[in-house]
Every structure is written in structure tokens, then in C-alpha cells.
Image: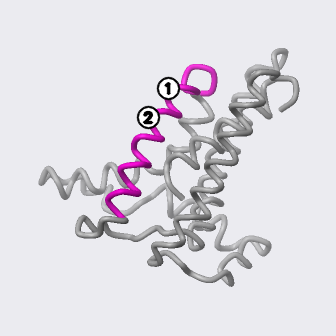
Amino acid sequence: MQTPTHILAGVFIQKAFDWKHHRRVALVLTAVCAFLSHGLLDKLARLTYHRANPDFHSPIWVGYHAALVLVTILFLYWWWKPFKWGIIFGSLPDLDWVFIHAQEIFHFSIPWYRQPHLHHLLGCIFDKLPPFTLIDRLPNYRHQPWALLPEVALIALLAAVLRFKARDPAKL
């Protein structure tokens, strides 16, 4: 899944563990659950438009990713301060790609960081646990541009719930 989806998952998870009297326990649970949510969402990404390599010649790919950047900035503006821990740990595994692609772009080498270690760790968890192995039976639409619609719908739904429920925090 894309960054806005991971941000929203982190926000929802941190809201779920918003315990004032057990702050440390809440932060540990937020960190673990948000980190694991990244693996689950990435496993479900087979249902969404999620090409492995950029396609700067495709107007759909470029437009979609430009919109994702704008939505990511907006979400960070709205939710960073109150939900930074959920956002950080929900997005943390994508640092794999920052390190790997930065080496390619800037022509330097980190010998021990050529593979996406955090994603491999999550893969070990979600590729071996029986209920999650069933996700592999879902169709793979990663290269179908129309498959961006389910993720856009999910992002819109989650963001709307957060924005409208934010008026009354007790409801979420």
C-alpha cells in the first residue's frame, strides 16, 4: 500500500491505544501494532495499483503518485502532532526503500543495506502464519491502473472517518 494508507493505519492504531494512565504500554502497543500493520497492508497491496518500478512515462502513474505526495503532506499536517508515534511506526518499514534507492540515485554504497530488511522481517511473519498465507490467493492487480481505485476508496473512507469523528474523540 501507499504512504497515506500506512499513515492512516498508524493514526487509527494510536487512537485505539490512547490510554492516559498507561502511556508507556500504549506507546509500545502502538509501535508494535503499527509496524505489523505495515506488513499486512503491504501483503494486501496485491489488490492495488502498485508497480515495483516507477513509470514516469505513464500519465496515470505520475498523476497518481503526485496526488499521493500531496495527500501524504496533508495527512502529516493534520495528524503528525497528536499521532506521530503511530505514523512513524506505521511507515517505518518504508525506510528500506529510502536507503536502497538513495544508494542508486546518489551512487554510494551501504554494504549491509542492499535488501529491504524490515520488509523481509514482516514477510517472514506474514508469509508463514496460516491465516495470512491465504492473502496470497487473492488476485494480483499491481500492474492494472484501475486497481488504484480500491486504495483511493480506502484512504478516502479512513480519512473521512478520522476527520468527522475528530469533532467528538469519544466516538472513535
State yes or no: residue 66 in magenta: yes
Image x and y of residue 67, in percent: 41, 48
Quadrant where the image shows the N terminus: bottom right
Q: Which residue corresponds to the image point at 44% horizontal and 49% vertical from the top-left?
A: 68
**Are circles 1 and 2 on residues that touch, CB within 8 Å?**
yes
Q: Quadrant of residue 53?
A: bottom left
Q: Which residue is mark 2?
A: 73
Q: Nearer the viewer, residue 142 or 13?
A: 142
Residue 110 against residue 25 in the figure, above or below: below
Q: Residue at x 63, y 67 (%)?
A: 44
Bin the neighbour count of mark 1 within 10 Å (Cα to Cα): few under 14, some 14-19, many 20 and up.
few
Would residue 76 appear left or right of 135 to someone viewing this image? left
Is the C terminus in the top left, top right, bottom left or bottom right quadrant? Answer: top right
Residue that label 1 marks: 77
What is the distance, in whole Å, between disc 1 and disc 2 at their CAs? Answer: 6 Å
* Residue 30, percent from left and from top: 70, 36
**What are the residue bounds of the magenta stretch?**
61-83
**Amino acid of disc 2:** Ile
Give x and y (percent) for residue 169.
81, 23
Badge 1 marks a residue whose secondary structure is: helix
Q: Residue sitting at 68 percent across and 84 percent down?
A: 137
**The residue positioned farthest toward the left in the image shown:** 107
Counting other residues with Cα less than 10 Å from the Cα at mark 2, is it few (<14), some (14-19), or many (20 or more)? few
Type of secondary structure dominating the magenta stretch: helix
The residue lying furthest to the top in this view is: 21
Q: Is residue 36 above or below residue 163?
A: below
Q: Position of residue 140 (x, y in %)?
A: 56, 81
